[in-house]
Image: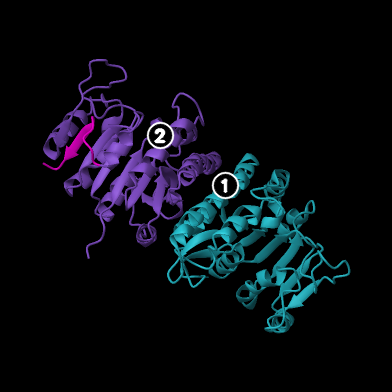
Chain colours: A purple, B cyan
Amino acid sequence: MNEAKTTLLKIGGSVITDKNGELAAKTQEIDRLAEEIQRANVQNLIIVHGGGSFGHPTAKRYAIKEGFKEDSQRIGFSETHHVMTVLNGLLMDSLIWHNVPAVSVTPSSFMITENGRIRGFEESLLRMLLKMHFTPVLYGDAVLDTELGFTILSGDQIISALATKFNAEHIVIGVDVDGLYETDPKTEKTAKLFNHLTLVELKKLQNKLSKPTARDVTGGMFGKVIELIPAIERNIPVTIVNASKQDNIYRALKEEKIEGTRIERE
Amino acid sequence: MNEAKTTLLKIGGSVITDKNGELAAKTQEIDRLAEEIQRANVQNLIIVHGGGSFGHPTAKRYAIKEGFKEDSQRIGFSETHHVMTVLNGLLMDSLIWHNVPAVSVTPSSFMITENGRIRGFEESLLRMLLKMHFTPVLYGDAVLDTELGFTILSGDQIISALATKFNAEHIVIGVDVDGLYETDPKTEKTAKLFNHLTLVELKKLQNKLSKPTARDVTGGMFGKVIELIPAIERNIPVTIVNASKQDNIYRALKEEKIEGTRIERE
């Protein structure tokens, strides 16, 4: 028997928190998404969520991503991890309330990075959880780093690492815009959405956007997509959808046709 | 240079929760203990706490300790782990507020048991945290088990496993009575406290209490102490103190003389 295929769902921090606030959770959105996840009833699902206005302001204030440089950052590392567990707790509460057998798995308790990149991690625990029909939930986290002391591990990097380890069938990326645009849809009303991208097209785009003079004109979305290239190279398709719109996550998990950006190897 | 010696502090669930309630945290006690821990300022400290009225009622309702037997238990496992993260979050919040660089390390994210006993676990992450002067905080948790599917891993077993792995200097066990008594001090006013026990005396007591006809007349305390025998055999002294009394944890961490039960190899 082949190992069952895994579906990976990323929920962006901007979907479940108000990025203009601090520690501002969108609890109604969390409840709506938990209900959609329960209704989709996908076997072998792993969820990863971002930090939004929980992780980011604290991490930034103490420059956690840049690594350990002075003693005063230490409490900032503690705080960044702690506020992420609080946001995670709100999502777990809602998932379990909706009868999803979700189990939070703390990245900083079993993943260590090396210069910001995940080193190998023990995956047997996640595999056991899936085999027992649990839904593991991970999140972007403050983690220890062999070179930097500590740093920030993004949910996007975790998704990509899990996708290749677990030979995922499909990656769904839920964000607060309709997909990947040529320019930032939040500042440019006429920004054009990419409906479909191949790996070759994505790499051309990467080339263009990574010039030293360029900035991420897509409003930060492209940086997240770049993380997924190793997964796309392994023929794992990615669907970027607007998770702030009712039923989009449900439909994406069900592999129904939906507005968004689909990225495939060819 | 020798590796710095580690101090282990167990905080009983009955100290930080009201065992007569459900999900009833004693937040004033949590704050008082966090302040004492901050004031004691012990280097290389690892804290482990119990579940009290968070973990225990849920675990019992779904018979999580007995292992996976039917599908209806699955959500109970999710819930038991979740409520433990909630209690842990209250302690973390208070420790960080008191400027203790505490980092919660989730047992179920890196420890797996075999028939209820911890199998080897990757300890390098805890070692890195200590080296960077963080205070790791663990707790009794619902964990995966290679034989049972899942079970409950007690904070007492975690303390003992850490003590032997980290060659601890001292184990402080904070409970809601004055130490280990000959009989249950909660039901017998005249119960006699053991001030000092050697390993030989402890084992004699174990022999007497583990007869099939015997029950744990010490009010459950003896079962916890039994877990610590491997550590005591390695010459790690154990101090059981009443953590509900002001300054007892501070004084025990400072190795000041204090009412309680001291257990030493000889």
Q: Compared to A181, does A68 lie above or below? A: below
The kind of secondary structure the magenta stretch mainly shows is loop
- The foreground one among A9 and B243 is A9
Q: Give the range drawn in magenta.
A: A255-266
- The foreground one among B230 and A71 is B230
Residue B171 location, quadrant: bottom right
SS class of the residue under badge 1?
helix
Q: Are marks 1 and 2 on the same chain?
A: no
Q: How many labels does the image show?
A: 2
Q: Which of marks 1 and 2 is in front?
A: 1
- The foreground one among B23 and B100 is B23
Q: Residue furthest top?
A: A189
- The foreground one among B34 and A256 is A256
Quarter holding the N terminus of chain A?
bottom left
Picture coordinates of residue B58 (x, y %)? 58, 55
Quarter holding the C terminus of chain A?
top left
Q: Is B49 included in the stretch rendered in magenta?
A: no
Identity of the residue drawn at 55% across and 63% down = B63
Picture coordinates of residue B23 (x, y %)? 64, 48
Whether tag 1 and tag 2 are in contact, CB under 8 A, the answer is no
Please, what is the three-letter code of the amino acid marked with disc 1? Answer: Val
What residue did someone put label 1 on?
A: B86
**How far apart are the alpha carbons under marks 1 and 2?**
21 Å
Identity of the residue drawn at 21% across and 25% down = A193
Q: Is A257 included in the stretch rendered in magenta?
A: yes
What residue did someone put label 2 on?
A: A13
